[in-house]
């Protein structure tokens, strides 16, 4: 038994050992999808290693819980892939250091003044539909609520999914005190609520649901990777909830220069021009004319709705209770 | 006599050691999480609602699974037909399917645009809806009917053929045989099977959510997840995990008390021949087997159809991940046996229900809490990513334990009851007894247990989330990554690969266990 175990342990070790040359290592914590073969990780790693003389190592998994568990002893130098709705706790942990970067040239739809977290891409929460099946797509949240109840929508649970949480905040920012009435109208159309984005999106592409909660930039994948023009995002007049992906530097990193260099790299044109088609979202600092084809022509919401992180943190619990009460009727 | 006491103590030592591992992995990790919490947790009204729903759906799912499994198991036990053994293996497949794959397969059959709704549509009938409480139960029956059928089928096959021969010579009809042979067997087997399935449904999470149609179908495991992920409230997470344990333990006590050991006595392992056949019984059996086959295999067929087009075009990393998963599964299966045999021996030797019940602990444990606890314990000493695969193997082994114990304990008890005195008389102890009595007599349940453990650990990814690094992904993790990158067709192919490998491993072990033992 012992030999079998050490064999497996060895298997796990060989890959790490192979990379441990004399170069300094920059440990970047990231969500699992990030470092996968098909995520943005591999090209970022190659791009940064070409200029830093270092070894960039992605550590993937549940980033925030892991950071909270590790606390001051964390090995992370940089954390990438957080978003605006959970940064309140990240900031309160005191683990992050100011980025010290010039963020004046960002192309975000909102002003950015955060001195700790740097945005590297963004998108908006949106409902995606098949434009060959739904020809009169709703152009406002009200119109969505007024759709016949046999239009079936899949959403994600705000208790287990970050996009589900974004929908909760979106409804709250559009309807405020009347959010419960909005949920009451939306609920008959909700086919089901999934644990994560993947299950929901799979049900949509399988044709089981007419609409799915995802992002305005989702159609870009189908257009660019599959040359499929049938998927569209319904653009609402009231505006869409903004979803910003962030990177932050760990305060007690043992590689401060490398961490700073990586933070700066994130805003470089090389990083920014690659992120659109690897993370399927809008770059945070790239002129529109440099966007890949397929992104440039995407319909974009006229208005970005967003809560500050304090607001988001304060609203989350009551909004969740409101949703639970409305959905349990 | 002196030798006998040595035998007892080595059984006891190994058994207690194995139990220690189990208790550390379950209660130990829970304590680690609770100690890390800042302040005690409190349960809100939503948590209580989750507890009520969890109990209700688990009880309903387990009851229905068992009720449906009895006619299927009986039919399989008393019929022999070409392809029976392949069918038995295939019928076991849903149980070892990763949840996300099973959900998509079920939806392809029972969903709004699924097979059944399409057929109904031909006749102008409204499509059926699978979303709601009934969807949750349907999915849980889909997952657990195979296990229930296998456990009950083993009970049937454990009735020595001599008893049926005797019954026939006494002129007994089907109802007499049911009363004297089959019902006592069911009384012994059913409570344990019910317990195991109840416990599986207790920790259900993604199934309940995806098919439950909304937050009414919230389980305790989801509440744990939420407390951990969004609130980082370790106090509440560990309190909920404790509640989950409590529910499991309470039910375990009831079920094990209800279970009555039946005393069939020893047989000579002849093939079962039945003399009580009637045409009506034949029809009944054909109907049971056909319906179960359709219910269990149609969704699997849809998974196969969806996955085939891209199977050969999968990126190499997926196959690398598959190899990694197979190795983890094999190690995990070996570990499961190393844990469950000593525990089974201890339980049988001391005739202790408590020992057996402790072995079930792992299934009521929250995988999330186990993972978090292990992380808290090991993080100060080891780099978490170095432990990713060993921890996956160990935890999966522990999680398979309840199923393997379910198969091994009654079998070992029977072996000891029938041959123990003889072996004692011959002075067979320790290694000799293991090699010449236990291993040959336990071949069938051990093959089943190893196969189950291997297959289950192929599909699992519950505990690895905190330990994974970018490079050592297992197959289920790659499947999720493909989905997260919008590659749904590749993900379907990866799901087919996962299904094939899980089923293949299960079949190999199970087949190995049945060599010479089956007709």
Image: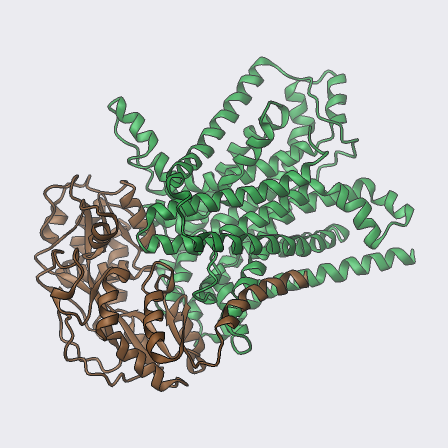
Chain colours: A brown, B green
- Is B180 or B37 nearer to us in this picture? B37
Find residue A282 and report its image quarter: bottom left
Taking the view exactly as shown, the residue that stands out farthest to the front is A50
Residue B35 location, x and y as percent?
50, 75
Residue A124 location, x and y as percent?
19, 61
Taking the view exactly as shown, the residue that stands out farthest to the top is B279
Q: Is residue B221 above or below residue A86?
A: above
Q: Is residue A198 left or right of residue B87?
A: left
- Is B425 or B333 nearer to us in this picture? B333
Residue A221 location, x and y as percent?
24, 53
- Is A263 or B190 nearer to us in this picture? A263
Q: Is residue B79 left or right of residue B487?
A: right
Which quarter of the image is occupied by the N terminus of chain A? bottom right
Q: Is residue B7 left or right of residue B292?
A: right
Q: Is residue B142 above or below residue A183?
A: above
Q: Is residue B434 above or below residue B25?
A: above
Residue drawn 80% across and 60% down? B10
Find residue B155 and report its image quarter: top right
Residue B460 visible from this viewpoint: no
Residue A123 visible from this viewpoint: yes
Residue drawn 57% across and 17% down? B282
Residue B103 location, x and y as percent?
39, 44
């Amino acid at each position: 038994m012992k030999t079998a175990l050490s064999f497996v342990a060895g298997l796990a070790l060989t890959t790490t050992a192979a990379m441990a040359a004399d170069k300094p290592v920059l440990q970047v914590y990231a969500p699992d999808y990030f470092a996968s073969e098909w995520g943005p990780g591999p090209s970022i790693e190659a791009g940064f290693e070409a200029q830093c003389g270092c070894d960039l190592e992605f550590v993937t998994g549940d980033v925030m819980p892991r950071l909270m568990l590790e606390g001051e002893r964390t090995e992370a130098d940089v954390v990438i892939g957080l978003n605006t709705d959970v940064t309140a706790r990240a900031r309160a942990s005191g683990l992050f250091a100011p980025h010290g970067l010039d963020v004046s040239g960002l192309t975000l739809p909102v002003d950015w003044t955060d001195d700790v977290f740097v945005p590297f891409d963004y998108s908006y929460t949106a409902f995606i539909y098949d434009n060959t099946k739904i020809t009169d797509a709703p152009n406002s949240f009200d119109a969505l609520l007024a759709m016949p109840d046999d239009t079936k929508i899949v959403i994600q649970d705000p208790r287990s999914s970050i996009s589900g949480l974004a929908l909760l905040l979106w409804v709250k920012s559009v309807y405020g005190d009347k959010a419960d009435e909005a949920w009451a109208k939306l609920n008959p159309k909700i086919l089901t609520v999934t644990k994560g984005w993947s299950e929901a999106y799979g049900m949509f592409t399988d044709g089981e649901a007419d609409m799915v909660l995802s992002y305005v930039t989702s159609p870009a994948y189908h257009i660019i990777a599959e040359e499929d023009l049938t998927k569209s995002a319904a653009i609402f007049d009231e505006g869409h909830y903004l979803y910003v992906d962030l990177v932050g530097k760990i305060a007690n990193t043992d590689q401060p220069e490398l961490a700073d260099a990586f933070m700066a790299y994130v805003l470089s044109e090389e990083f920014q021009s690659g992120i659109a088609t690897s993370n399927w979202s809008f770059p945070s600092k790239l002129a529109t004319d440099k966007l890949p084809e397929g992104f440039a022509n995407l319909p974009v919401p006229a208005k970005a709705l967003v809560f500050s992180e304090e607001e988001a943190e304060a609203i989350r619990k009551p909004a969740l209770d409101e949703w639970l009460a409305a959905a349990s009727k | 006599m002196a030798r006998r006491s040595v035998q007892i103590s080595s059984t006891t030592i190994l058994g207690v050691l194995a139990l220690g591992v189990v208790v550390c992995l379950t209660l130990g990790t829970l304590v680690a999480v609770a100690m890390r919490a800042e302040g005690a947790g409190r349960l809100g009204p939503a948590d209580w609602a989750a507890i009520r729903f969890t109990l209700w759906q688990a009880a309903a799912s387990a009851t229905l699974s068992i009720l449906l499994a009895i006619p299927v198991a009986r039919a399989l036990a008393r019929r022999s037909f070409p392809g029976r053994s392949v069918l038995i293996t295939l019928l076991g497949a849903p149980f070892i399917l990763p949840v996300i794959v099973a959900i998509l397969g079920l939806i392809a059959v029972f969903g709004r645009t699924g097979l059944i709704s399409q057929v109904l549509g031909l006749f102008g009938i409204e499509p059926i809806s699978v979303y709601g409480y009934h969807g949750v139960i349907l999915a849980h029956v889909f997952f657990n009917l195979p296990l229930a059928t296998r456990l009950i089928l083993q009970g049937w096959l454990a009735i020595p053929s001599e008893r049926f021969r005797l019954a026939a010579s006494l002129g007994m009809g089907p109802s007499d045989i049911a009363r004297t042979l089959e019902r006592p067997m069911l009384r012994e087997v059913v409570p344990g099977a019910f317990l195991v399935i109840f416990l599986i449904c207790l920790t259900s999470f993604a199934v309940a959510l995806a098919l439950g149609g909304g937050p009414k179908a919230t389980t305790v495991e989801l509440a744990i997840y939420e407390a951990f992920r969004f609130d980082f409230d370790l106090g509440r997470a560990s309190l909920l995990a404790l509640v989950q344990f409590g529910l499991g333990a309470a039910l375990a006590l009831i079920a094990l008390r209800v279970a009555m050991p039946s005393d069939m006595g020893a047989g000579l392992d002849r093939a079962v021949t039945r003399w009580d056949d009637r045409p009506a019984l034949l029809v009944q059996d054909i109907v049971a087997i056909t319906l179960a086959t359709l219910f269990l295999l149609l969704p699997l067929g849809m998974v196969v159809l969806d996955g085939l087009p891209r199977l050969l075009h999968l990126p190499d990393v997926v196959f690398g991940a598959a190899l990694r998963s197979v190795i983890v599964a094999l190690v995990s299966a070996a570990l499961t046996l190393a844990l469950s045999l000593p525990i089974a021996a201890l339980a049988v030797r001391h005739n202790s229900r408590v020992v057996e019940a402790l072995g079930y602990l792992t299934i009521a444990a929250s995988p999330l809490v186990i993972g978090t606890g292990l992380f808290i314990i090991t993080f100060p000493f080891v780099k978490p990513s170095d432990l990713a695969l060993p921890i996956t193997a160990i935890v999966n082994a522990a999680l398979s334990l309840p199923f393997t114990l379910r198969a091994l304990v009654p079998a070992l008890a029977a072996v000891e009851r029938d041959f123990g005195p003889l072996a004692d008389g011959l002075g067979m102890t320790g290694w000799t007894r293991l090699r010449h009595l236990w291993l040959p007599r336990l071949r069938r349940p051990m093959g089943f247990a190893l196969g189950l453990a291997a297959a289950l650990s192929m599909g699992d990814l519950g505990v690895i989330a905190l330990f994974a690094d970018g490079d050592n992904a297992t197959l289920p993790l790659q499947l999720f990554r493909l989905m997260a990158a919008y590659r749904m067709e590749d993900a379907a192919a990866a799901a087919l690969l996962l299904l094939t490998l899980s089923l293949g491993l299960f079949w190999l072990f199970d087949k190995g266990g049945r060599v010479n033992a089956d007709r």
